[in-house]
Amino acid sequence: MSATKPDSIYQAGDRGEWLEIVRQHVTSLRYGVVQIVVHDSQVTQVEKTERTRFDQLRPQKKSQA
């Protein structure tokens, strides 16, 4: 699992910019979280946490003969 550093602070006038960053983070993830942090009704940071999942191999039952 890896977390990226928060992106720069975004003011209300930069709405298109932070929305585009959120879009990019979401489309680049297979498993993970995109978090939008708001302070005083303004987006202050966007965080992306990405997880790497591995297929679990199920142990095969031994057949009784």
Image (spheres, rainbow, N blue to C red):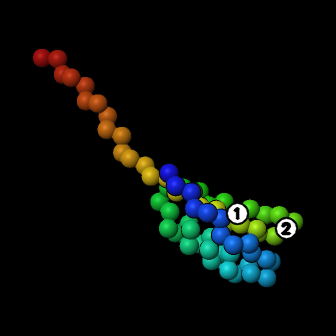
Up-down relation of residue 65 to residue 16 (above or below)? above
In-front residue for pair 28/63: 28
Q: Is residue 23 left or right of residue 65?
A: right
Q: Is residue 32 above or below residue 17?
A: above
Percent across and percent down for residue 31 are 50, 55
Give the residue furthest to the right: 40
In the picture, the disc for residue 36 is 1
Q: Please name whichever residue, 64 or 10, is drawn nearer the observer in this view of the structure.
A: 10
Horizontal placement of 44 versus 58: left or right?
right
SS assignment at label 2: loop
What residue is rendered at 50% in x and 51% in y?
1
Q: Position of residue 46 (x, y in %)?
A: 67, 66
Q: Residue at x 74, y 72 (%)?
A: 9
Task: Give the percent coordinates (x, y) of residue 33.
Answer: 59, 56
Secondary structure under badge 1?
strand
Residue at the spot of label 2: 41
